Every structure is written in structure tokens, then in C-alpha cells.
């Protein structure tokens, strides 16, 4: 066959050689023992915070059917460790580095983004606004359009780097939150994060996790997050990056058809460490087989009959409002 | 050292300036072929698999992440960490010793010669054997004996004599005694049933070995109580030591920070990942 598949995608001005990248918190330098890092569409770091954090009490993960609940708690060695140790490490690769950040306040987010923007080697900021906001009684920023708008605007003013905002699935109206991020200057939204969950040990009657609750991830959550990506992609013009239970190239294609411009792979890497490069290869094969010249042609390609569109209102809160 | 820049095709970048080889995997997830999987006593099973050269290059104290087959009615989602029991690069085999305790090991129990098993490894930092070591002592209990097993041959190849103190509940549950003796090791077994396995008796044995000049370093796994005895003696006599630690794991390769433990590093409590920074740690830094 003579056709070449173009895997490149454009995420708000940042060109990626392919649409596959890790989900924050599931990637570290050690994975280079398993895969060639230059093959990835992007790197996404573990979330860094200004404060030093130990993380949550153990146990930090518990298995569920087709999924995993984690409550790791974002252990962080702070900004200087990141700048002195992590950042130089990734400069040896030609893959763009996306830095995931978090803070307990709007001002904390803005000052961290501003500080990091001074260092070369960062291609984009991913703001993990699914974390608790101490200014709003511990509720995650991304649970409300208002808090999302405020923190995104502060971030936009603080950095000229491409700004990705990572949303939470744990809210009733994700598309409205996505619109708030878009209106305040986000270059892309990442949909979504883990789903708030819990498990109880029947031998001890105690919660399975040291933190009591945690976030569900893995193949079991894919249909839920896929639906949210579909809704968000209809609601905003900026790119949507899909993240939730992707383990195969078929999952990635499904997400792209639903409207994702790129995908993040997380929990799958814990089970198959080379999942990301396997997906990249199989994505190219899929496009070749279906005679799709550019992987970007898949984005939003789900076929919905016009007659069905009227009935969508009930499941599309934005269209309904 | 300046970081080198590698292009996707593996050629060196002009800025890098060094003739760097194309990227190559040092940890692989592969379908190994089961050669043998049978009981060695009332509790432990011994599995041998045929694997890649990379996997068979595993060092003592390293481990593998096994994607266990699903036993009826159960669906283990994550891989299961398993200590290396033996690695044989010449015949491209690795061996595991395991006890059936949960969904993962119930799945392993079903495997028959000729079946395939998805193994990922070798992982983690193993035991270090310094060239000058004349005589080492390996102290293990329960499943820790499996982790210590590859040391027997490594010590012989290093020119170090080895004395093993193996602890178990009953004499019939002590494993790898023959393996150690075949490599020229002296093996002392202590058991709960014979009331010889208490820390006081093990300490008495260790003090005897130290007095005879037969303990230049401690290697241990599988018992916090015995680890504390060795820490005390290591402190008293200025002896080095290494301990393999356990912790629940998810990724096994340093990504998720699920398997952290506290360590005492120069008086400060430091969090480390068992899968990545260990599983073998400095004896004096380990906390029970």
C-alpha cells in the first residue's frame, strides 16, 4: 500500500506528531525502559504543586472489575525539584512537554503558571482544576462554571503558554464548565478526570482506601467519559482532549469520533506498560485499513441522523438551556 | 553530563555530539511460555517460564509483574508483583515461587506447561554484591526465602561464601534449602514448631557467625522482627546490609506512587517507591 497516514494533530496551535499522550499521574521517567519517548504525541507530567505534599495514607489503590480506584493524593516535591531535576530530563527528547499543575487557590494557580512559564522546555500548561478549592469549601474548581471561569482567567493572564484545562466528570453539567473555560481563554479542555468512588472491605468493614474515597479509572469508565467528551465537543470550539478508560486504538478512535482531537492514556499503562506506543501503531493501521488519510479527519466524525438531533436535547444540558 | 538529543529515527542530533545507539527496551512485557508449574510443598508452587533474553537477565532481588489468568468468577485487573526465584540467561528462563493466596495466584495455579503468561520485567533495584565480600549471611522467612534464592548462585559467582538462616512455621515449609546447599552454602533452619525461630535464637546464631568472621554483610527479606535484629547487630559491629521490602503495587515501574514506604535517611523520614527505588534497600534505612 502506498498511502501514508498523517497522524499529526493540532491542539490550539501546538502541533503534536500524533494524538496519543499519557494522562497526568500515570507517567514518569522510568517508562523509558519500556518505550521510546520520542514516539509519543506529548509528555504530560504528574501534577506539580508549589507546596511539598506527602500524599494520602495507604492503601492508595484498590482494584475493581475492569477498573481501579486510586487515592494517591498528588505527592509533590515542589517547584524547585521539578525545575532542577524533571525539566532538564525531558529536554533531551523532541516530544513536547505538558506540565500539569495544581493549587488550592486561584492565585496559587496563577502564580505557579507564571513562575513555570519563565523556564524553557515547557510546551503547554495543563491546569488540573479537579482538585479541592479551599476558597469554595473544598469543592473542586471544575465542579462549577463560575470557579472555572475565575481560575482560567487568572491562568490566562499569568502565562502565554498554551493552556489546557482538565475538567472533572463529577459535576452535573460538564459542557457548561467547558464553555466557561473556553470563554476565559483556555486553548483546550481535557475531559475528564477520575470518577469519585468508594469500596468497602467486607472482612474488616473498613473502606478499602486510606483516604476513604478515591477516583475510579480504567476501561469501566470509558462509556461515561466518552459521552461527556461528545457533549463538550458540541459545546465548545476549542479542542477537547479525551481521557477516560482508553486502553486500545479502537477506544482512541471512538473518542476521536465523539469529538476528541487527542487522547490521554492512563490506567491502561499500569496493565500494559507499552499501551501508548501500541495504540499509536494500531491507530495508523486502522486509518490505513479504512483509507482515512489524516487521523484528524476522525475528529467529531460520529454519524448522527438529522432526525435524531432533535431528541438530543434531553441529554445535552447546554442545548437544552 | 550534557543530555543528548535523540531523533525519532535513533540517529544522534548534532547538538548531542555522541554516537548514541537507537533506543532499546530494557523492560519488556511479553508472553512467556510456561515450562513447569507444580507444588513443592503444602503451600508453595514453583513455576518456570521460557522468556526473552532481557527478562532472563534479571538480577537477584528484582521482580516481575505478572498478568495473571482469570480464575473462574474472578477478574484480577492489575498485574501481580512476584519476586524473582531464579534467572537462567543461558536457557532463557526465569522462575517464580508462589503461594496461592488470592485471585491473582489462583489464576497462576491454573497454568500448565505450554500455556502463555504475560510477564513484565525485570523490575526494580536488586541486591548488590560488592566484589570484596568474603562471607555473607542471608536471613529470610516465609515468602522471603524465594526472594533470597537467586543470591546463592550470585554469591558463589562473586567468590563470597554464604550462610543462610531460614525461618518458617514448620520444617516442611522451608524452601530452597537444597538450592542453597547445591551452591555450597551452609543452611540453618529455624521453625516455630521447633521453637527455634524467635528473634533471641536468631540473634544468638548471628552473633556466633560474626564472632567466627563469617558475616561481612546481611541480606534479608520476609520478617520485620528478624530485620530489627540484624539492624541492631549491623549498628553494633559496623556491618553493611540490604533488605528487600514488600508493598501493595499497581504499576510496578515508578509511575503511580501506590507502593511508597517511609525510610529513615540520616535521621529524616523519606518516602520511597518500593517498585522503583527498591525493592532492595539499605538495611539501616528501612523501617518496619
Image (cartoon, coloured by chain):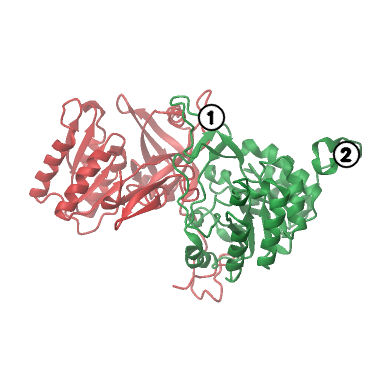
* Residue, disc 2: A309
| Chain assigned red | B
- Local packing at callout 2 (Cα closer than 10 Å; few below 14, some 14-19, many 20+) is few
Using the image, name the chain to which the residue with label 2 belongs. Answer: A
Q: Position of residue A82 (x, y in %)?
A: 50, 63
| Chain assigned green | A
Q: Quadrant of residue A155?
A: bottom right
- Asked if A95 appears above or below B211 in the picture, the reply is below
Q: Between residues A210 and B24, which one lies in front from this camera angle?
A: A210
* Residue, disc 1: B75
Using the image, name the chain to which the residue with label 1 belongs. Answer: B
Q: Quadrant of the C terminus of chain A?
A: top right
Q: Between residues A196 and B170, which one lies in front from this camera angle?
A: A196
User: Which residue lies most toward the right here?
Assistant: A307
Residue contact between numbered discs 2 and 1, judged by CB atoms under 8 Å: no
Is residue A116 found left or right of B26 in the rendered image? right
Q: Position of residue A70 (x, y in %)?
A: 53, 41
Q: Residue at x 38, y 42 (%)?
A: B94
Q: Between residues B90 and A278, which one lies in front from this camera angle?
A: A278
Amino acid at each position: 500500500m502506498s498511502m501514508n497516514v498523517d497522524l499529526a494533530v493540532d491542539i490550539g496551535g501546538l502541533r503534536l506528531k500524533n494524538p496519543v499522550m499519557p494522562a497526568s499521574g500515570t507517567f514518569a521517567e522510568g517508562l523509558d525502559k519500556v518505550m521510546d519517548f520520542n514516539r509519543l504525541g506529548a509528555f504530560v507530567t504528574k501534577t506539580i504543586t508549589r507546596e511539598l505534599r506527602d500524599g494520602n495514607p495507604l492503601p492508595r489503590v484498590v482494584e475493581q472489575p475492569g477498573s481501579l480506584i486510586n487515592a494517591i493524593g498528588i505527592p509533590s516535591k515542589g517547584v524547585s525539584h521539578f525545575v532542577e531535576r524533571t525539566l532538564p530530563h525531558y529536554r533531551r527528547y523532541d516530544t513536547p512537554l505538558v506540565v500539569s499543575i495544581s493549587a488550592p487557590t486561584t492565585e496559587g494557580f496563577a502564580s505557579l503558571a507564571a513562575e513555570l512559564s519563565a523556564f524553557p522546555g515547557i510546551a503547554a500548561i495543563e491546569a488540573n482544576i479537579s482538585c479541592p478549592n479551599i476558597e469554595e469549601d473544598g469543592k473542586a474548581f471544575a465542579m462549577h462554571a463560575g470557579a472555572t471561569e475565575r481560575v482560567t482567567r487568572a491562568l490566562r493572564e499569568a502565562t502565554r503558554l498554551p493552556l489546557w484545562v482538565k475538567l472533572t466528570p463529577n459535576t452535573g453539567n460538564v459542557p457548561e464548565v467547558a464553555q466557561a473555560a473556553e470563554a476565559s481563554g483556555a486553548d483546550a479542555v481535557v475531559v475528564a478526570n477520575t470518577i469519585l468512588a468508594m469500596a468497602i472491605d467486607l472482612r474488616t468493614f473498613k473502606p478499602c482506601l486510606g483516604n476513604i474515597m478515591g477516583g475510579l479509572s480504567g476501561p469501566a469508565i470509558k462509556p461515561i467519559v466518552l459521552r461527556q467528551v461528545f457533549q463538550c465537543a458540541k459545546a465548545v470550539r476549542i479542542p477537547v482532549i479525551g481521557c477516560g478508560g482508553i486502553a486500545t486504538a479502537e477506544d482512541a478512535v471512538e473518542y476521536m469520533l465523539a469529538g476528541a482531537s487527542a487522547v490521554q492514556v492512563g490506567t491502561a499503562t499500569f496493565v500494559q506498560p507499552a499501551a501508548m506506543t501500541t495504540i499509536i501503531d494500531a491507530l495508523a493501521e486502522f486509518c490505513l485499513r479504512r483509507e482515512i488519510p489524516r487521523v484528524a479527519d476522525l475528529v467529531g466524525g460520529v454519524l448522527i441522523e438529522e432526525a435524531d438531533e432533535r431528541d438530543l436535547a434531553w441529554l445535552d444540558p447546554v442545548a437544552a438551556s | 553530563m550534557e543530555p543528548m538529543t535523540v531523533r525519532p529515527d535513533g540517529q544522534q542530533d548534532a547538538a548531542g555530539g555522541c554516537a548514541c545507539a537507537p533506543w532499546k527496551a530494557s523492560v519488556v512485557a511479553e508472553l512467556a511460555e510456561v515450562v513447569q508449574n507444580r507444588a513443592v510443598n503444602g503451600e508453595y508452587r514453583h513455576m518456570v517460564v521460557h522468556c526473552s533474553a532481557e527478562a532472563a537477565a534479571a538480577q537477584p532481588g528484582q521482580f516481575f509483574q505478572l498478568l495473571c489468568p482469570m480464575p473462574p468468577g474472578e477478574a484480577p485487573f492489575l498485574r501481580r508483583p512476584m519476586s524473582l526465584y531464579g534467572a537462567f540467561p543461558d536457557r532463557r528462563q526465569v522462575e517464580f515461587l508462589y503461594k496461592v493466596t488470592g485471585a491473582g495466584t489462583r489464576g497462576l495455579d491454573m497454568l500448565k506447561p505450554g500455556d502463555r503468561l504475560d510477564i513484565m520485567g525485570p523490575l526494580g533495584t536488586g541486591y548488590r554484591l560488592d566484589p570484596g565480600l568474603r562471607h555473607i549471611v542471608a536471613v529470610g522467612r516465609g515468602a522471603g526465602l524465594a526472594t533470597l534464592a537467586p543470591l546463592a548462585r550470585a554469591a558463589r559467582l562473586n567468590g563470597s561464601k554464604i550462610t543462610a538462616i531460614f525461618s518458617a512455621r514448620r520444617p516442611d515449609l522451608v524452601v530452597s534449602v537444597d538450592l542453597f546447599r547445591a551452591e555450597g552454602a551452609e543452611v540453618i533452619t529455624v521453625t516455630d514448631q521447633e521453637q527455634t525461630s524467635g528473634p533471641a535464637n536468631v540473634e544468638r546464631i548471628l552473633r556466633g557467625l560474626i564472632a567466627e568472621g563469617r558475616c561481612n554483610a546481611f541480606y534479608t527479606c520476609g520478617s520485620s522482627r528478624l530485620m530489627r535484629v540484624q539492624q541492631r547487630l549491623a549498628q553494633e559491629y559496623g556491618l553493611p546490609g540490604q533488605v528487600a521490602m514488600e508493598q501493595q503495587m499497581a504499576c510496578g515501574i515508578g509511575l503511580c506512587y501506590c507502593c511508597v514506604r517511609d525510610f529513615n535517611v540520616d535521621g529524616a523520614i523519606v518516602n520511597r517507591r518500593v517498585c522503583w527505588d527498591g525493592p532492595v534497600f539499605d538495611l539501616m534505612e528501612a523501617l518496619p
